Image: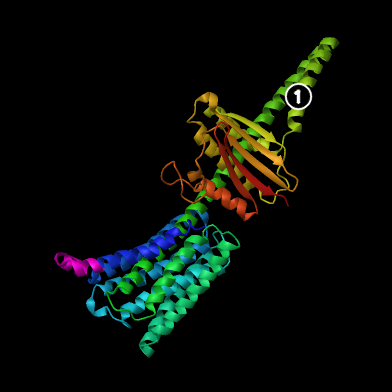
Amino acid sequence: MLSYWSDVLLLLLLPFLVLKGLSIFKLNINISQDLLIHLLEYNSLEGILELLISLICINIFLLVVYSYRHNNNVKSLFISITFLSAGIMNLMHSILVFNNSYLKYNSSSEVFAVSTRLIVVFAILLNYLIRDKKGRNIYYLYSTILFSLLSSLLITYLTFKLWLTFGNVMLLVKLLLLVTISINLYIYIRGYVFYKEALSPYILKGFIFLLFCESFAIFRVEVFSLSYWLLHVYKFIAFAYFFKSIFIREVSDGILAKQELELQHAKLELKEDMIKELRIQRHDFKNELQTIYTMLQLDKVKEAKDYIKDTHLDLDKVDLELKDDNIIQSVFMPKRKEAEDKGVDLKLLLASDLSDVAMPLNKVLKILFNLIDNAFDVLVKLPKRERKLKVSLLDKGNAVDIIIHNSGPVISQSILKSIFEPGYSTKGENRGFGLYIVKSLLEEHGGRINVESKEGIGTKFICHLPKI
């Protein structure tokens, strides 16, 4: 836990140390004074930070709109439009910052900046509270877009109206902002501690930095002072964490949607193969009957009996294989073929049919296929004689264990600590979400996953699924 939050501590201290060091450097070395004045006392630096925040907000909008066509998540679309509104407000702020006359408290520039943060914190809070609904209901879609636009405009309008009417009301607005941030912090701390929600730490980190930012902003710190720059650096880091959390969620949802589609295609191909197999069996059965009938017509009773006996033994063999069969066995047909093509010795031990686990079958199959695909990726790098994979479904009474055991190389302890983190991969860019999805699906239904990796034995991924 300490190492997981170490980046928060580092990012909290690093801007302070850097800015403090630059201040000392400025005081002691005269030759660099002009350069440092431009770095520390020139409004363009603040304008660049604010412009980057605007770009983050606009990129969140573009990312969610792009992924909407894959996951149809209207709830995500709501937050994307509010981030677009926040990005436009902050863009206005960044433009005004480049004009020195607006670098003062209770100016229109500050109102734009505060409106940006209000829009974001209220949007994330509402996004957590509103009902999650996926699909292409056109009325729900339009009402969500309209509501997100109106709520953003209303926040901006009220902030400006209060500023124009009362002048010094910004302190109360900032207090409201602090309260809303605190509510969000409570929600996501609870989600992370009690419900182990996978994305809570990233949004939580964003709100921690935003809380530090608002703690500085509530007081009228001197412009271009150390506190002034910390305020803007912490705000930028907060928005960077918001982007990271939404990026991971959208990519994960997109991968799940893609895998769902691939699973549907696999099921369709399986059904087509089964229909084809039934047609072949019907044709063979007709030929068998024709042969027996011909023998009987020729009065070759003994030959017919022997033929029927041989056929009966074949049927017994088929029946014996089907007796141990279950739906998982049939679903594994494409994976058997893939293993054969890759030269992998695939063995199955199916002591459970997964009929009473507390998880939908399609999600169990996602877990299986993700882990098997990962094993294939590792095994194809080995000599063909060493490519061994065993998949076991074991009934443990009140639970079922899924064990994926491959003969690949040992996974080091340093890597084991990170393999379930979203985006972690040794296979290149745009990878590293498979094991994160497996862990998320298991935890969502009260399960868990463990990894054992030992020299000479290989690597085991052990998934524990509770029964209903």
Residue type marked 1: Lys
Q: Is residue 146 visible?
A: no
Residue lying farthest to the front in this orientation:
28
User: Can you give x and y, in whole percent of width and height, for residue 113 in the image?
Assistant: 36, 75
Q: Does residue 26 belong to the magenta stretch?
A: yes
Please determine whether, in this image, residue 165 is positioned above or below residue 421.
below
User: Can you give x and y, in whole percent of width and height, for residue 158 in the image?
Assistant: 42, 82
Camera-nearest residue between 452 and 345: 452
Q: Does residue 460 belong to the magenta stretch?
A: no
Quadrant for residue 8, please give it: bottom left
Question: Magenta part mainly helix, strand or loop?
Answer: helix
Residue at image x 47%, y 53%? 251
Span highlighted in magenta in the image: 23-37
Camera-nearest residue between 188 and 144: 188
Q: Is residue 432 visible?
A: yes
Residue at image x 46%, y 80%? 176
Give SS at disc 1.
helix
Residue bearing mark 1? 317
User: Can you give x and y, in whole percent of width and height, for residue 244 in the image?
Assistant: 43, 58
Camera-nearest residue between 186 and 153: 186
How many other residues sit within 10 Å of disc 1, few (<14), some (14-19) or many (≥20)?
A: few
Camera-nearest residue between 332 and 41: 41
Please determine whether, in this image, residue 112 is positioned above or below residue 135.
below
